[in-house]
Amino acid sequence: MSNTIPDIVQTQVFQAPLQKVWDAVATADGIAAWFMPNDFQPVAGHAFTIHSPYGDSPCVVQEIDPPNRLVFKWGKDWVITFALKDLGETTEFTLIHSGWSADTVTEFGEGHAVVRDRMNQGWDSSVLPKLKAYVEA
């Protein structure tokens, strides 16, 4: 029996060209504009830090395929994937937040089941709407 908790997967279509969305999700300034301050660089293996209200989180770029896909490890448990698909005048953006396990406690002392629900709500109600507003401006 697996103790894996399902990934957070959210897909949206933005009224913005692919390159504009890519620049928003794969540059330090872009990520800071809609997510959190960071010292990201679009280089596989680059270690960077996301400065969240809960403290600093170490991250490492695992995969980068401009302008289609960015994958990075976030904290000790999670992997974030940004997948982009060019639809002409619009861009399909998929967020995958993986690495959840019912047996795991975060570095902040909370179980994954509790944190996953909170993170899913945050992506849905706050973070992705900020990204949408940023790229569609």
Image (cartoon, rainbow, N blue to C red):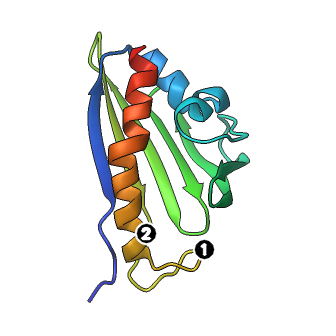
Which disc, if any, is residue 115?
A: 2
**Are the residues tagged 2 and 1 within 8 Å (C-beta)?**
yes
Instruction: Give above or below for 102 relative to 85.
Output: below
User: What residue is at 58 percent from the left and 34 percent from the top?
Assistant: 31
Label 2 amino acid? Val
Q: Quadrant of the C terminus?
A: top left
**Real-space CA distance between mark 2 and mark 1, rounded to the nearest whole angstrom:** 10 Å
User: What residue is at 40 percent from the left and 51 percent from the top?
Assistant: 122
**Residue 82, x across and y down, in percent:** 43, 40
The earlier-in-sequence mark between 2 and 1 is 1
Q: Nearer the viewer, residue 93 or 38?
A: 38
Q: Secondary structure at mark 1?
A: loop
Answer whether residue 100 is visible to the viewer in this image. Answer: no
In the rendered structure, the answer to whether residue 22 lies left or right of residue 14 reads: right
**Residue 79, x across and y down, in percent:** 50, 57
Q: Nearer the viewer, residue 61 or 55?
A: 55
Which disc, if any, is residue 26?
A: none
Q: Quadrant of residue 39?
A: top right
Instruction: Give above or below for 29 relative to 99.
Output: above
Answer whether residue 111 is visible to the viewer in this image. Answer: yes
Residue density around tag 2, few if under 14, some if 14–19, many if 20 or more, within 10 Å: some
Residue density around tag 1, few if under 14, some if 14–19, many if 20 or more, within 10 Å: few
Which disc, if any, is residue 108?
A: 1
Label 1 amino acid? Phe
